[in-house]
Image (cartoon, helix red, strand yellow):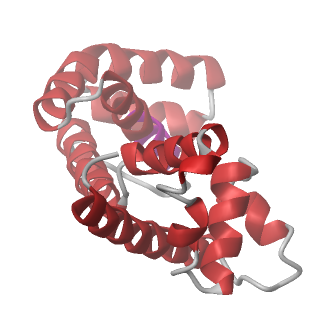
């Protein structure tokens, strides 16, 4: 009996042992294929494994939905993988390099260690941000709060995590431009 039909029958019977066994079979059958596809698209091992695992979780959750019939598990799984990769790449393009954040922290440390030289003051960079941008940057970078924590602790000042992420990303872009402008004016840090 083909795998799709066996999965359908197991789900109808609600036999948890059989369902678990079939999920393991699906995972073993397609794991290497999914891993290969994802590794051809992404470079980071952590990202590759995360996307691979997330894809299987989505597939299994879809299978567990009532009245969900999947005619071709392989095709369905590979569609999930493709969509996860696209979603990941979109998010990746939105991210500002962690090196920029590290650079900001290094500048701040240099400022503390070498305050008398008056070369690179963090205040010069942060002054270009508005109050909201500055609030989010400080909470996220310096206080190590997650975006979710910032929303929760904001007393409805911020409406969603996506709003915070958007403001954060724009703020880092502004800071990055300012840092590059200052570097060009004064030479490299």
Tell me where residue 66 appears, x and y as whole percent.
Answer: 55, 55
Q: What stretch is highlighted in magenta?
A: 56-63
Point out the residue furthest to the front here.
116
State the residue at coordinates (14%, 38%): 41
When the figure is inspected, residue 105 is found, relative to residue 6, above or below; the finding is: below
Q: Nearer the viewer, residue 158 or 125?
A: 125
When the figure is inspected, residue 180 is found, relative to residue 42, above or below; the finding is: below
- Magenta region includes residue 50: no
Point out the residue furthest to the left here.
40
Horizontal side, residue 74 vs residue 61: left or right: left
Q: Which of 105 and 4 is in front in this view?
A: 105
Determine the main secondary structure of the stretch shown in magenta: helix
State the residue at coordinates (36%, 25%): 49
Report which quarter residue 33 is drawn in: top left
Tell me where residue 14 appears, x and y as whole percent.
Answer: 63, 34
Question: Can residue 71 be seen here?
Answer: no
State the residue at coordinates (53%, 37%): 11
């Amino acid at each position: 009996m083909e795998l799709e039909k066996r999965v359908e029958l197991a789900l109808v019977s609600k036999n948890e042992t059989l369902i678990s066994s079939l999920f393991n079979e699906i995972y073993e059958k397609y794991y290497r294929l999914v891993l290969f596809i994802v590794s051809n698209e992404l470079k980071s091992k952590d990202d590759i494994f995360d996307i691979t695992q997330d894809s299987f979780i989505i597939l299994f959750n879809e299978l567990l939905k009532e009245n969900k019939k999947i005619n071709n598990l392989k095709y369905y799984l590979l569609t999930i993988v493709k969509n996860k990769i696209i979603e990941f790449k979109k998010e990746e393009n939105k991210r500002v390099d962690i090196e920029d954040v590290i650079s900001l922290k290094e500048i701040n440390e240099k400022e503390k260690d070498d305050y008398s030289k008056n070369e690179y003051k963090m205040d010069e960079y942060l002054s270009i941000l508005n109050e909201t941008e500055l609030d989010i940057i400080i909470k996220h970078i310096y206080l190590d709060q997650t975006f979710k924590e910032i929303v929760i602790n904001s007393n409805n000042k911020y409406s969603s995590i996506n709003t915070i992420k958007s403001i954060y990303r724009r703020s880092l872009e502004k800071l990055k431009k300012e840092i590059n402008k200052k570097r060009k004016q004064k030479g490299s840090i």
